[in-house]
Image (cartoon, rainbow, N blue to C red):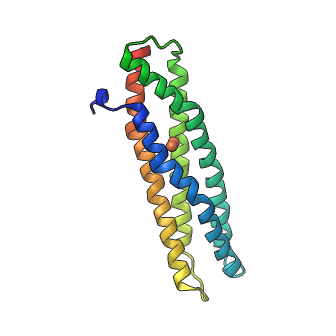
Amino acid sequence: MDTTTQNLVILTSGIVNTYHDPLRRDIPYIRQEVQVLLNLWSKWNQSLADIKELFEQFAKQVTKHMEREEGEFFPVLCEVEKCYNWDQKYNKCDLERFDTTIRKLEQDHEEFDTYVYDIVDVFKNIQLDEIDKSLYDRCKRIFSTLEIDVMHHTQAENMKLHVIAREKYNVLCG
Ligand SMILES: [Fe+2]
Ligand SMILES: [Fe+2]
């Protein structure tokens, strides 16, 4: 990967626009859909309560995670990019802390992937006698889309943003 042409300012703002903002918009909508399902079917199936619980845990953690990235991590990357491009001295070098931050974010990503995978899995195995098929299909689509979006988000950060960030940080601070 040619890191010199990959600008961290552009990458981070692309991630916010493509993944963070849509996810933030979708969370209340998905929450509402899960509640509709629960209201209709909870007396028949414990699985829906499990889905609600898993989704709420996921929503809480992913919201905090994005806030942390946008409030703390991405600004650091933008500063690194600026110093890297303009040959300025970056005087906040702390390789260990930088590495720990990235590893923690990647650990979070793993947890998010697992949450969404579990939700989709529980949902797939729901067996109900009395279901509104169109509602069930709609929710199934929502969860599958969520699974793909979360997976793409993880890939964009783990395999691109973090790789380039490490390389530029190492050039400035190594
Ligand atoms: Fe992110
Ligand atoms: Fe992330």
Residue extending farthest left: 2
Q: Position of residue 151 (x, y in %)?
A: 44, 52
Residue extending farthest bottom: 130
51 vs 168, left or right, is right
In this rendered view, identify the residue nearer to me: 123 or 90.
Answer: 90
- The residue positioned 43% from the left and 22% from the top of the image is 82
Q: Position of residue 41 (x, y in %)?
A: 67, 80
Picture mark count: 0
Quarter containing the N terminus: top left
Q: Position of residue 113 (x, y in %)?
A: 50, 53
Quarter containing the C terminus: top left
In this rendered view, identify the residue nearer to me: 143 or 127.
Answer: 143
- The residue positioned 51% from the left and 75% from the top of the image is 138
- The residue positioned 53% from the left and 41% from the top of the image is 107
- The residue positioned 45% from the left and 22% from the top of the image is 80
Which image quarter: residue 123? bottom right
144 vs 127, left or right, is left
In this rendered view, identify the residue nearer to me: 94 or 43.
Answer: 94
Q: Position of residue 27 (x, y in %)?
A: 60, 59
**137 over 167 or under it: above or below:** below
**32 over 18 or under it: above or below:** below
